[in-house]
Image: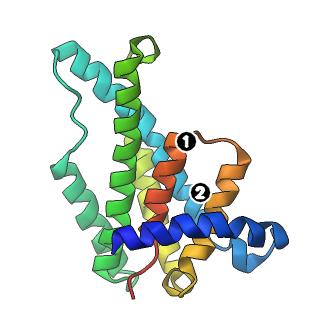
């Protein structure tokens, strides 16, 4: 099912530029911009997390560890609980955050792989992750709030197309690279509620 959603999202990205150009100011077409911006903000934290993991692993002579099942479980449980307070289905909230977590890992893996091939581009000092966790926590809460506020759009049959319009807007702004664009597609594909 996730593969199908991702494929629909990819096709919608190809088709949607026409509708985005036709009426870029339409509230209907731009209604998910805030949610997509939050997803991108969360994705951007992957750069600092990857750098911290890279530097830490280099100090200990180990491979960087991307997966953190214990931390991921805390996110899933706390966001599901928050979503329940807004009458959101637990399975949907968990689906959304699985998409956010997995797309963040896409960024981390992509950066770490690049640093293996180009050690000169690798970070030499670890960023302060104490400033990253509050950003992730705040954005997680705002994403749940947006799920509740935009539930009608996210449960509609044209959800993937609506998301594609907002994602395409990010792409055309020119502020993301191919790695972050691929991760953004992965993260937003998880936002449409299952029917």
Q: Which residue is mark 1?
A: 178
Q: Residues within 10 Å of mark 1 (few under 14, many from 20)?
A: few
Q: Would you identify the image quadrant in which residue 31 lies?
A: bottom right
SS of the residue under disc 1: helix
Q: Residues within 10 Å of mark 2 (few under 14, many from 20)?
A: some
Name the residue at 54% across, 57% down: 38
Image quarter of the C terminus: bottom left
On the question of residue 33 being in view, the answer is no
Considering only order in the chain, which callout, 2 or 1, is on the residue closer to the N terminus?
2
- Measured in 3D between alpha carbons, the distance from the residue under mark 1 to the one under mark 2, in whole angstroms, is 17 Å
Name the residue at 44% across, 58% down: 186
Q: Please give the count of numbered marks on the rendered protein.
A: 2
The front one of 123 and 21 is 21
In the displayed structure, 144 sits above or below 41; it is: below
Query: Do the residues under discs 1 and 2 have CB atoms within 8 angstroms?
Result: no
Q: Would you identify the image quadrant in which residue 177 lies?
A: top right
Specify the label residue 37 is tagged with.
2
Name the residue at 53% across, 87% down: 157
In the displayed structure, 170 sits above or below 113; it is: below
Instruction: Report x, y in % for residue 175.
Output: 66, 41
The front one of 12 and 150 is 12
The front one of 145 and 173 is 173
Q: Is residue 30 left or right of residue 89?
A: right
In the displayed structure, 190 sits above or below 28; it is: above
Instruction: Report x, y in % for residue 139.
Output: 47, 56
Q: Is residue 184 left or right of residue 111?
A: right
SS of the residue under disc 2: helix
């Amino acid at each position: 099912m996730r593969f199908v959603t991702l494929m629909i999202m990819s096709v919608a990205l190809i088709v949607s530029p026409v509708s985005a150009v036709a009426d870029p100011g339409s509230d209907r077409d731009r209604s998910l911009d805030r949610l997509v911006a939050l997803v991108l903000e969360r994705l951007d934290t992957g750069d600092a997390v990857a750098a911290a993991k890279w530097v830490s692993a280099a100090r200990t002579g180990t491979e960087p560890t991307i997966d953190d099942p214990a931390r991921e479980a805390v996110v899933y449980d706390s966001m599901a609980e928050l979503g329940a307070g807004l009458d959101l289905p637990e399975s949907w909230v968990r689906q959304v955050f699985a998409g956010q977590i997995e797309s963040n890992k896409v960024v981390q893996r992509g950066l770490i792989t690049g640093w293996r091939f180009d050690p000169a581009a690798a970070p030499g000092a670890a960023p302060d992750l104490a400033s990253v966790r509050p950003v992730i926590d705040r954005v997680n809460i705002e994403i749940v709030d947006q799920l509740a506020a935009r539930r009608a759009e996210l449960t509609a049959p044209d959800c993937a197309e609506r998301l594609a319009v907002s994602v395409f807007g990010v792409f055309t702004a020119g502020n993301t690279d191919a790695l972050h664009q691929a991760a953004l597609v992965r993260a937003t594909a998880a936002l449409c509620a299952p029917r």
